[in-house]
Each structure stands twice: as C-alpha cells, then as structure tokens.
Amino acid sequence: MIHPPPSRSPRFPALLRGSLPRFLPLIALLASLTGCGEKAAAPAAGGGGGGGKKGGGGAAPVYVGPAQTKIVPLVIEAIGAVEPIRTTTVRSQVTGTLVKIVIKEGQTVKAGDLLFEIDPRPFENALRAAEADLQKAKVQLETARTQVARYRSLTTDQMVSKEQFEKISDTARSLESEVLSDESRLATAKLQLEYCSIRAPLAGRTGNIPVHEGDLVRVNEAGGLLVTIHQVSPIYVTFGVPQQYFGSVVRYRATGTLNVAVVPPGLEEKPEQGDLTFMDNTVDSSTGTLKLKGTFPNTAQRLWPGQFATVTVTLASPEVLTVPSSAIQTSQTGQYVYVVKSDKTAELRPVVVERLYQADAVISKGLSAGETVVTDGQLRVIPGKPVDIKEAAAPGGGGRGGKSGEGKGKKTDKEKKAS
C-alpha cells in the first residue's frame, strides 16, 4: 500500500498563519523606510567628509600674548616661625609675701616698670640692723685708732712695751675688717629691700600670671614663675631653606641687605617687610636645611610669638624676558611655545624656561622681546598653518557670538532658497 508523501510543516504557527494578512502592510512600510535610510546615509557621509576636510584646513582660533622684558624678583619661599628677640621669665629673688600685683595679664610694659611688690617690712628691719652694726663697728674702730695713736707716743718714750702696742694695733686692724664686713652686709640688706619691688627687665608684653596677692613666694622654688615677658617689637621670624640655596644666599647677601617679606595667617594679605639679619654657621645635617632669621619692626604687632607664616626672601630684582606661563607647552623633547609670525602663521619654537614667578615664565633662550606667542588654543595649532587671533572675552561677549550665529542662520536660509 502506497502512502502519500507527508506534507511539509508550515513555516508559521497556525495562530500566526491566520493573522498574517493583517501584518503584510506593516512589513512593507518597514522595508521602505529601511531603504530610504540607507539611501540618505550615503550622501550624508560624503557631505560630512567634505565639511571635515574644509574645517581642518582653516585658521585655528587662538589667544596670544607678548614676550616682553620686565622686572621679576628672584625669590626663595619658605615657612617660618615667629620668635621674640628677647624673652624673660620673672621670678622672685627674695622669700616673702606677695602684697601687690601692679600689672595685668597681656599688658605692654616698658623696661623698669613696677610689676610686683613683696612685703618689705622684714627687709627694712634687716637693713636697720645692718646699719646699727656698721655704726657700732665704726665707733669701735675710731676708739682703736685713737689708742693706737696714743700708745705709739708712749712706746717712743718706752713707757709701753712693744708687745702691748702691737696688740692694740692688731685690734684696730681687726675692727677695720669688721667695718668692711658690716658695710657689705648693709649693701646686701639694701639690695634685698630693692628686690621686694620686682620691675620689668625689658620692654615687651606680659603673659599669664599664675600667682595671686597674698601668696608666699620663695627663692629658687620649682614652679615659682611670676610672669613671662616677650619682646614683640621688633621681632624675629626664623625659617629654613634647602642647602642648595646656600651659595645664592651668600652671594646676594654680600651685595647688600636682603629683603624678607612675611605674610601672617589670616584674611589680610599685606606682607610685613623686614631684613635678613642672621644666617646660621652650620647646615642641619638631619634636615639638610640652613637656618635663617629675619628682623621685623612689627609696629602693628601682626606677628606674634609662636605663629607660623609664609616667608619670601628676595635675592635680586633683575630685568628678564617673560611670557605668560600658559604659553609654555611640554613635549618629549622639551618645552616649547607657538610663535605667531608676521604672516599670521604659527611656528613651533623650543625655549628654555629659567623659572616661574606668579603668572609669568622667565625665558633664558629661544625668544626675543616683542614676539607674539600663543597663550590659549594650542591644541588646534599646526606649525606652519595660519591662526585666527581672538581678543580676550569682555562682558557681553556672548552677544557678539549671538550675532555671528544669526548671520550663519541667514546664510543657510539663502542657500535653502537658492536650492
């Protein structure tokens, strides 16, 4: 028995087979859109390539600046610490009761001003006792001298033995020594009484006062500090510079006094001006730095002991060739700039930058004064190709850009009409 060949299985499921006539218009629309997109893409790609070639050959827009000579200081910058030129810790030199504190904490005092007073009565009594002892010794000495004079004449007449005369003479000499000793004790008593009035040994500003009236202060007592005085006008600023600057500091210091400027921390940026007055006689081997000190008048007292500040030492103020630091570019072969020639084309020029100072770069080789260099837009510059020099943007510059955009829009409309 011959069976009929099996029928081929349909490509679509039965459900989709029934709905296929409804999707035929949609499939035809998608096919037409795909063909149109492919046709439109080809001219667009060709047009874009033509436009890119035209844009690459145009002048690169850049901003420029001059190479000019100006005075650029040669400086060394460091961080320094403010130190008082003189400082003293005031302590009592006698033991006694503190009866009066004349000053206040943080007060400015002059040399010789009264600071504290210690009860002077015990020392006044000691002074009177020393005066009495001295007076007694002087009377005894005077009596002994009178006896020596009388016994000398009796010895001449041989009425007194020489042994008696020598004994009286020895007593007189002993009394002379006693008078000298009493005079010394009297001077000590006067000095002790003077120590009861504690005065400022230098002009400066007082610190914390840890004692109070009525306290018993002792000589050489641990923690017996009464007050500390710092001299703040003038004042030191101590800082360290790397040892490689040693030769430069010595060379320029030999030509004259070096200026030192210090900017104390805070909102005010005006620096304090002073002079370099000290250079240490050795380099710190642990840090490799040389210790320097600048002296500042500090009349406004903007510098305070213990404060940290930014220090700038001006070694010299030479006149050098400079360009804006933004003009300097770096490559594998070194640093260079783009120089705008008279025909408005760019030239790549290698340069040697000696140093940077604020917004300027000091050029030691490669440029001449009066040349024009590119300061912005270097990425689009091609050596030997023209550049379009732009002016720095001013307030309202966006308006000029808007007009330019408007002109381009009108040109496009004309082109559309012409087409």
Image: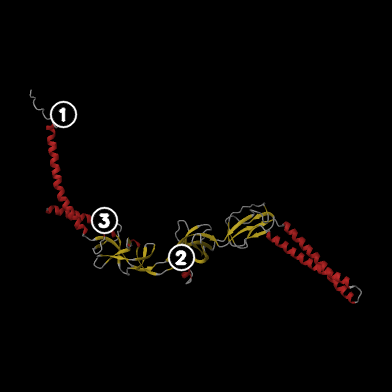
The x and y percentages for residue 51 are 18, 55
The extreme top residue here reads 1
Alpha carbon distance from label 1 to label 3: 65 Å
Colouring scheme, one of rainbow, by chain, secondary structure, one colour: secondary structure
Alpha carbon distance from label 2 to label 3: 52 Å
Q: Which of the numbered marks, if any, corresponds to residue 15?
A: 1
Residue 100 position by quadrant: bottom right
From the viewer's side, name the closer residue of 316 and 412: 316
Residues marked 1 and 3 touching at CB (< 8 Å): no
Give the amino acid at mark 2. Answer: Tyr
User: Which residue is located at x 12 percent, y 41 percent?
Assistant: 32
Mark 1 or mark 3, whichever is nearer to me: 1
Q: Is residue 417 visible?
A: yes
User: Which residue is located at x 83 percent, y 66 percent?
Assistant: 140
Q: Callout 1: few (<14), some (14-19), or many (20+) C-alpha neighbours within 10 Å?
A: few
The x and y percentages for residue 123 are 73, 58
From the viewer's side, name the closer residue of 371 and 46: 46
Mark 2 or mark 3, whichever is nearer to me: 2
Alpha carbon distance from label 1 to label 2: 92 Å
The extreme right residue here reads 159
Q: According to the image, label 3 marks what residue? A: 399
Quarter of the figure that contains the N terminus: top left
Q: Is residue 359 above or below residue 9?
A: below
Give the amino acid at mark 1. Answer: Leu
Q: According to the image, label 2 marks what residue? A: 245
